[in-house]
Image (cartoon, rainbow, N blue to C red):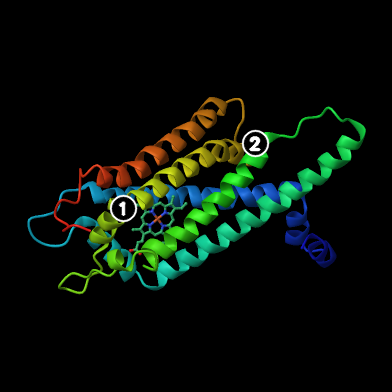
Amino acid sequence: MSTAANASGSAIGRLLSSTIGLKVLMAVTGFIWVGFVLGHMVGNLQILLPMPADGPHAINKYAAALKATGGVLWVVRFGLLAAFAAHVWSAITLSGRNKAARATTYAVHTNIQAKPSSYYMLVSGLAILGFIIFHLAHFTLGLVQPEAAGHYLSNGMHDVYTMFILGFRNPIYAGLYIVSNVLVGLHLQHAVSSMFQTLGLRTPKYRAYVDFAGPAISAIVIVGNVLMPLSVLLGLIGGSVPGS
Ligand code: HEM
């Protein structure tokens, strides 16, 4: 990719073949996903709202409203997919370059330590990719637990509430979501600070806020996303849904 990019000589090609260009791409695409993860969490937290006496649950209305946006939803989906692919590609390319640079350095200075955070970020990022693939198969495509995903209300609305509750009543799936979302939160802790650093926003004036943002966003994502499977597992919500 970098050779082709260099050969084309275009400004974007040159930018993407430079290490700083790749870091900026990773920061911008990471920023898009942080926004999605936070928005997605706030939307999903509606699961904690009580079941209304009549009419669909808030989460079902929310899911139906998202689907009703039609073309906009698909544009957002493709945007997220493109951002994710670019994020993973830049992470793997940068990691390969770091490795190559270290191999050269080690030939001269054998006592230099590898930076563990970049390795940890790559491994946790790839684990999150695995989680997202499972998650889409589970809740979006209904392939993992078809018996949970295949419920519809009398008005034809997809019963996301029942899918959610039956999904998380299973301790294996609930446990997987809990572990995966802790991993997402820990990945974000480091990612958010390094994102601001790359974009040149970790200036002395804002350093304290920027250094607070990583742990704060990480804690919010972990608490919010773990609360949902945990509440179902502990039987705090979902009493209206018949046994799994
Ligand atoms: C406990 C945590 C989470 C819950 C309960 C949850 C729940 C859901 C549900 C119910 C859907 C399907 C909505 C529908 O088709 O009606 C969905 C879709 C999705 N989720 Fe999650 N999610 C969680 C965490 C995450 C995380 C951490 C990520 C990303 C890192 C993520 C990425 C996605 C994506 C990309 C979609 C597909 C969106 C679309 O196709 O429109 N989710 N999620």
In this rendered view, identify the residue nearer to me: 70 or 110.
110
Tell me which residue sits at (31%, 53%) in the image: 170
- Residue type, label 1: Asn
Measured as percent of width and height from the top left, residue 143 is found at 39, 68
56 or 109, which is in the foreground?
A: 109
Instruction: Please state the horizontal and vertical placement of residue 62, each as a whole percent of the image.
Output: 27, 60
In the rendered image, the residue lying farthest to the right is 108
Residue lying at 67% horizontally and 41% vertically, measured from the top left: 119
The kind of secondary structure element at disc 1 is loop
Quote the CA–CA distance across marks 2 and 1. Answer: 34 Å
For disc 1, the marked residue is 170
Q: Circle 2 sits in a helix, a strand or a loop, which is it?
A: helix
Q: Residue at x 49, y 60 (%)?
A: 133
Ligand 1 picture quarter: bottom left
223 lies left or right of 119: left
Residue 89 position, x and y percent, is 66, 57
Q: Give the residue displayed 29% in from the left and 62% down from the top.
A: 63
- Judging by the rendered image, the residue that carries numbered circle 2 is 117
Q: Residue furthest left?
A: 53
Query: Is 53 positioned to the left or the right of 170 in the image?
Result: left
Of the numbered discs 2 and 1, the one sitting upstream in the chain is 2
